[in-house]
Amino acid sequence: MAAELRARGLRVGLYTSPHLVSVRERIEVDGVPIGEQAFAEWTSFLQSEIERLDASFFEATTAIALADLAARGVDVAVIEVGLGGRLDSTNVITPLVSVVTKIAREHTDYLGTDLEAIAREKAGIAKPGVPFVTGERDPAVRQELAAEAGRRGAEPVILADTTRPPPRARRLGLLGRHQQANAWVALEALNRLPPPFGPAGDTWPESFGRAYVPGRFDVRGKWIFDVAHNPDGALVLADTLRDCNPPRPRHALVGVLGDKDYLGMIDALAPEVDAFVFTVPDTAPERRRWDLGRLERELGGLAVAHEFEPQFARALERVGVGAATVIVTGSFHTVGDALARLPGFAPVA
């Protein structure tokens, strides 16, 4: 969406999370991250309120982002929700359109234990009189999203058809069949925007070919970086590896947080990988790090070659030995720490 809005000559803000290497990646205007000095000044300006409210890190960065995007005079902003929706700090805004791409089982301690419960939390971003778009394919989950959006007064509620084949002579900058589905959702959302922001027509605009998000099947030479951090993401990564068929042997550097379904992720990736190196990213929070000793006991009879290297820098060196393709995945921490260590790969200088 941001790529198409920029192509229309608009000044476009973008707020995403989490970051890979620098917190400045989260806040961009026309592709330019917030400057170090500006981030420091907004933090100082808002510090008393942040402390008074005992705001979380995400709440604080959301306030900084909205302040910075306003100060830099954006015409329109694309704001990514953090966790859930109903209680997310980004939900203070009244948008031109609300979007839920799809639902996956994650953050169950906050959002609920089943997909329908998670859907109700996600649909909490719906607003009275504001179009609501979703690309969810599961009929029961889609019905729950639409019902909750309707209860909140969203108008209209649009169920995007994400099964359509890609248009001829239109390529996406982002790889994978899942990105094709995302493109149809983005197009539906753009078509619900009032002029000059929308509509965008009935096929993917050329700007979709220039869309880029670091760490999403991000191919750089023989390296592929993907922030898949749950079984759903790992399945999508495996599908994309199958479709794109990068050269073998493929080695995967995998570091997952301990509160994730890491065995499900490894099972999903194993058919497309020739060797694993399991490690612990340096920036992973101490209390959420996975235990490689426990992982070794739990893996049982994993048929794919694998080794355990707790030292991240050493693991990063070892995974490339003898590999035609190296996949770095498992969490934002794993991908971010690798990008920070590999020369010229960090997304923000």
Image (cartoon, helix red, strand yellow):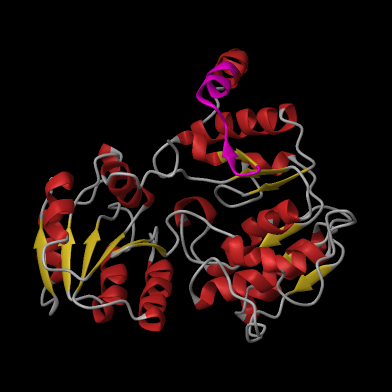
Give the number of marks.
Answer: 0
Name which quarter of the figure residue 344 lies in.
top left
**Residue 134 in view in this figure:** no
Question: x and y percent of residue 216 in the render?
Answer: 45, 61
Question: x and y percent of residue 178 in the render?
Answer: 53, 74
**Residue 343 in view in this figure:** yes
In the rendered view, tell whether residue 341 sits above or below residue 7: above
Is 262 inside the magenta-drawn segment?
no
Q: In which quadrant of the rendered image does the N terminus lie? A: bottom right
Q: In which quadrant of the rendered image does the C terminus lie? A: top left
Q: Which residues are magenta?
A: 30-41
> Which residue is more in the foreground, 257 or 333?
333
> Which residue is more in the foreground, 324 or 307?
324
Question: x and y percent of residue 129 in the render?
Answer: 89, 56
> Which residue is more in the foreground, 187 or 6?
6
- Is residue 123 shown left or right of residue 254? right
- Is residue 85 shown left or right of residue 284? right
- Is residue 327 shown left or right of residue 4? left
Question: x and y percent of residue 254 in the render?
Answer: 24, 59
> Which residue is more in the foreground, 307 or 322?
322
Residue occupying the point 27% across, 79% down: 272
Residue occupying the point 10% across, 53% down: 309
Is 33 inside the magenta-drawn segment?
yes
